[in-house]
Image (cartoon, rainbow, N blue to C red):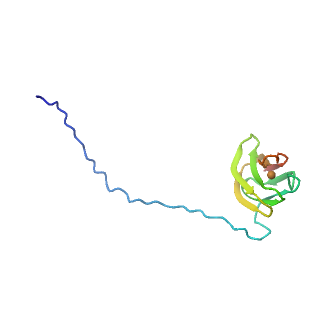
């Protein structure tokens, strides 16, 4: 019986020392509790008011990192979505479920025209312009 020449070589490659696991945890914690302060250091404040509307029909901001504070000064829950002129919706969404809620965050905006909307059913009237320059 002839066994074929099936020499299996398993070359061991001694690759240097495996680097120890250096896992860097980047923890970003930045939730501010409901501080009862009134004035937030925001570049742009958008307020939902009774009558299913934002407190202004148009807003302006300066291109770059824009700190936006969204306040609920109405009796209904709202959210704020930012839609660019080409219809693209920015990933940041501000939820303000009840009166007195304020949610703030930083959004990087380039110059252009945007629309601020609330996507809650029946709130289609909540549309305001945001001009970034
Ligand atoms: Cu709404």
Q: In the visual, does 106 lie left or right of 52?
A: left
Question: How many numbered discs?
Answer: 0
For the residue pair 74 and 126, the one nearer the viewer reads as 74
Please identify the quadrant where the N terminus is shown: top left
For the residue pair 13 and 126, the one nearer the viewer reads as 126
State the residue at coordinates (73%, 60%).
103
Q: Position of residue 93 (x, y in %)?
A: 71, 52
**Vertical relation: 52 (above or below) 29:** above
Q: Quadrant of residue 34?
A: bottom right
Q: In the image as oriented, which residue stretches furthest toward the top?
A: 1
State the residue at coordinates (28%, 51%).
14
Q: In the visual, does 10 lie left or right of 76?
A: left
Q: Quadrant of residue 50?
A: bottom right
State the residue at coordinates (21%, 38%).
8
Q: In the image as oriented, which residue stretches furthest toward the left?
A: 1
Q: Position of residue 38 (x, y in %)?
A: 80, 69
Q: Position of residue 129 (x, y in %)?
A: 83, 48
**Vertical relation: 9 (above or below) 19:** above
Q: Position of residue 83 (x, y in %)?
A: 75, 45
Q: In the image as oriented, which residue stretches furthest toward the bottom?
A: 36
State the residue at coordinates (76%, 66%).
40
């Amino acid at each position: 019986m002839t066994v074929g020449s099936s020499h299996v070589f398993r070359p061991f490659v001694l690759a240097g020392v495996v680097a120890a696991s250096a896992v860097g945890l980047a923890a970003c914690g930045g939730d501010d509790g409901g501080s009862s302060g009134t004035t937030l250091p925001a570049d742009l404040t958008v307020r939902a008011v009774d009558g299913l509307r934002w407190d202004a029909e148009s807003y302006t901001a300066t291109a770059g990192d824009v700190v936006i504070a969204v306040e609920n000064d109405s009796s209904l829950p709202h959210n704020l979505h930012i839609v660019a002129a080409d219809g693209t919706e920015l990933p940041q969404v501000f939820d303000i479920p009840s009166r007195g809620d304020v949610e703030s965050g930083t959004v990087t905006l380039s110059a252009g025209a945007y629309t601020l909307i609330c996507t809650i059913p029946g709130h289609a009237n909540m549309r305001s312009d945001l001009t970034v320059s």
